[in-house]
Structure formats: C-alpha cells, structure tokens
Image (tube, grey):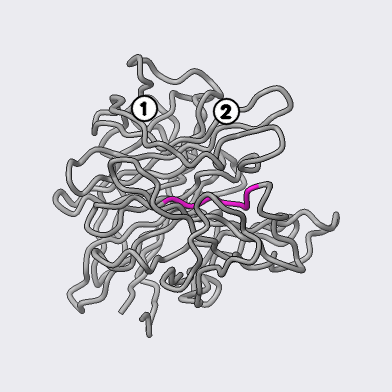
Amino acid sequence: MWPEVRLVGERVIAHDLEVRGTVLGGLSGIDYRANTGEYVLISDDRSERNPARFYTARFAVDGDGLGPVTFTGTHALLDPSGAEYPAKSVDPEEIRVDPWTGDHFWTQEGERADTVLIDPSVRIARPDGAYVGDLPIPDNERMRPDAGPRRNAALEAATFAAGGTLFVTALEGPLLEDGPGPTIAHGSLNRLTVQARSGPVLAQYLYPTEPVFAASRPTPGRGDNGIVSILATDPLDPSTLLVLERAYVPGVGNKIRLYEADLAAATNVHGGAATGARPAAKRLVADLDDLGLTHIDNIEGMTWGPRLPSGERTLILVSDNNFSAGQVTQLIALAMR
C-alpha cells in the first residue's frame, strides 16, 4: 500500500519555548484540522509545570519542505467541574479532532503506584478545553492491583475510523494478564479497542509489537518498545491502521518504525483472554533510520497532513522531549505515495 515513503522536511522547536504563559514541551499527540489548516498538539505535562493543556499551531508543508512553526494558542483541559486538573491527577497522551463536531477526544493513561490506582480514560473537550464527557473504557483496561494496564503503558494512542463512526484506541503495552512486556528476545501483545463513537465497545484485537531492538548498556534488560500512535489508513475502512512503534534503549537511543496493521483476520478478544487468539497481521511501512533524518528523538504523535501537489499524502510526526534539555521537540513531515 505504501510503495514509497520519503522525507519532506523537519524542524526543531526551541527548548522551553514560552507560549502564552506556558512552557512548551512533552508534545505526545498531534492532529490536523483540514478545514482550517491548523494543528492541535497535546502536552503530557501532568499539571506539574503548567495546567494540563493542548496547543494550536500553523506551519506549511509543501514541495519546499516543512516551514517555520507558529504556535497560535494554548488551552487548559478542564475537568467535569470546570476546573484545571490538579498536579499528577491526569496524564494526557493522544488528541484527535472529531470530524463530525470539531470537539477534541483525548486519552490519558491514569496511574499505577503502590498506593494509587487511577483508571485511564478517553475524554471529550470543546475546542476551548471545556469538558464534554467521557467514553467508557473496557473493564479489562481499568487499573486493578493484579490486572489491567501497566504503569505508563495504557491509553497512548487513538484514531477515528469509518468516517468518524468508530473510535479506536491502543494500549502502549500489554495488559498484565496478557503476558510480559517486550524484551530483546520477544515482543508483546497489545490490545486495540474498537468502539462506537457513542461509547459501546464493539471489539478488541491483539497487535504484536516488535522485540526491543538492542541490548541496553551498561545495565542490561532496560529497553522497551510500544505503540505510541495509530491512524486509520482509509477514511472509511476500519480494518487497516497505521501503527507507530516507539522503542527506547538506554545507552543506545530511539528506534521509530511505522507498520500497517490488518485487523481483518484477527480474533476478536473482547471479554476474553489473549491465549490462542490470532493477532493482527502487520507489515513494515518505514523505519525512520532509513529516511535521512539528522536526528531521531522520542517520536510519540502522528497525523495525516495536507496532500502535496504531487498527490502524495503527508504524515506529520512530533516528538515528546520529556521537558529535558538533552532532548528536542521535533516535527517531521513525510510523504507517502
């Protein structure tokens, strides 16, 4: 389906850039408003530096590359009471613009700690950040002492599908009950959940992530790999998804790969165990190491952008710098024929 993927351009945003009284960083999700030409980017700041929030931005993507980035606004995400989220009460990850209403669906990972269990969630906000509601999550994605998502490996990715009638989410890592996380010897089985935009969960499928790509150093066994973003590849067909796998290995660095997942023959495991189920088929679309980038950081978000005059579709990626001076906020534009 993707016979050619090429680099169009890349930009690095100034570290700790101030945007409307907030520190820009932690950009873990991005979406494109085709009707306005504007991008929406969510920060995974857990209300520790500034209130949990998303940004809007503009930049050109054309035959000349990826143009300068202008941040046009920021909006705090508000809780059901209309207040900003307290520190460490929410962990934003993905953001998608509803093609029907223009509202923003955003995911957050919750928390798993010795004395705290906070469920992940899918929340809906107005374009100004005001709370609208929540989508229900499957019972097996709730945080329980010995079951549910792993810490910091919950609802990381989401996309609208089937013309906006479906909402699909992905766990970054496997449920505790679905087996171990990835190692250098094996990958993991992560769940994709398909639900109606009105809420009911329709299906769950297993997606096989790749093994950790290299041994960590100097301490072995510390690498990881998981799903950080998904996109419907076709506006109407929900059976194929573009999946962004992000791996990080201490002492080695990042590896970012794009796969096409085909759900057509996968087993629906909603309400059941992973044992014996057929996972989604997948094939490699692109390894960012092969595209001539000057640097590859912690890429976490992706969105379809505008079409180029050549007819190619653009794919826009963004990195989460973890608010670290040793990392960068990076925007990348790819062309996919």
Residue 288: image x %, image y %? 51, 70
In the rendered image, which quarter contains the C terminus? bottom left
- The residues tagged by marks 2 and 1 sit, at their Cα atoms, a distance apart of 18 Å
- Choose between 256 and 236: the one closer to the eye: 236
Asked whether 239 or 42 is in front, the reply is 239
Residue at (26%, 59%) from the top-left corner? 162
Mark 2 surroundings within 10 Å by alpha-carbon count, few (fewer than 14), some (14 through 19), many (20 or more): some
Circle 2 SS class: strand
Is residue 171 placed above or below 115 in the rendered structure? below
Q: Residue at x 50, y 69 (%)?
A: 280
Q: Position of residue 19 (x, y in %)?
A: 36, 32
Determine which residue is flagged by label 2: 118
- Earlier along the polypeptide chain: callout 2 or callout 1? 1
Residue positioned most to the right: 219
Q: Which mark is residue 77?
A: 1
Q: Quadrant of residue 242?
A: bottom left
Q: Residue furthest front?
A: 272
- Split into 4 quadrants, where in the image is the N terminus? bottom left
| Residue 20 belongs to magenta span | no
Please report the bounds of the magenta region as a residue range: 169-175
Give the number of the disc on residue 131: none
Looking at the picture, which amino acid does disc 1 mark? Answer: Leu
Tell which of 22 and 91 is nearer to you: 91
Indicate whether 310 appears above or below 89: below
Q: Residue at x 65, y 33 (%)?
A: 144
Q: Amino acid at mark 2?
A: Ile
Asked if residue 59 is positioned above or below residue 89 in the image, the reply reads below
Q: Position of residue 85 (x, y in %)?
A: 44, 20
Identify the residue at image location x=62%, y=58%. 274
Q: Residue furthest bottom?
A: 3
Residue 133: x percent and y percent? Answer: 32, 29
234 left or right of 93 in image = left
